[in-house]
Amino acid sequence: MPPTTTGIDPSPAARMRTKARQALKTATSSAEHHDRFLTALYQALTAAIFFKAGRGGEALTWLEAEAALRAAGQDPPTSRQAAELLSAIEAAKFSGQPLGADQRNDLLARTRQMVRRLAP
């Protein structure tokens, strides 16, 4: 779909790319707030996956994420890495254990790299 007269692309994929980038910014600025940080990482990664799949959405399981990426033509290793990262973010969020600085930095770096790979 072409951009509107305002120059904004209204397609689901474009919205998901914007959402992924905004969520990464939120994660970066809220690293000290465990739940907000992990929620933002989850949102960034799922939005990037939905971007790659060419559709909108809010939530995915790791199995759905891998299947959506594979269906969209993403290579199997990257599809699996994205699914495993999504699983790691969910595990950190629901474990109830606070993340150390190294763990936060690792999850942020891995998510940022995956978002750039899926939604350049």
Image (spheres, helix red, strand yellow):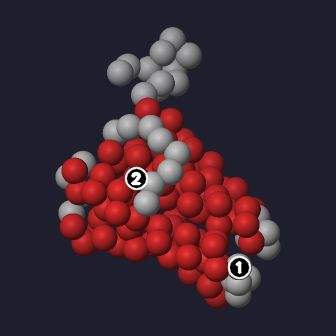
Disc ID at residue 96: 1
Q: Residues within 10 Å of mark 1 (few under 14, many from 20)?
A: few
Question: Residue at left 63%, top 73%?
Answer: 94
Asked if disc 1 and disc 2 are in contact, CB closer than 8 Å, the reply is no
Q: Please state which amino acid type lies under the numbered disc 1.
A: Gly
Q: Please state which amino acid type lies under the numbered disc 2.
A: Ile
Residue sitting farthest toward the top? 5
- Determine the CA span between mark 1 and mark 2: 26 Å
Question: Residue at left 34%, top 48%?
Answer: 52
Considering only vertical position in the picture, is 102 above or below 108?
below
Q: Is residue 105 at least partly visible in the picture? A: no
Q: Is residue 9 at least partly visible in the picture? A: yes
Task: Report the residue marked by disc 2.
Answer: 49
Q: Secondary structure at mark 2?
A: helix
Percent x, y of residue 119: 41, 51
Considering only vertical position in the picture, is 68 above or below 10?
below
Q: Report whether 59 appears left or right of 35.
A: left
Question: Residue at left 23%, top 57%?
Answer: 70
Q: Secondary structure at mark 1?
A: loop
Front-lying residue, 94 or 32: 94
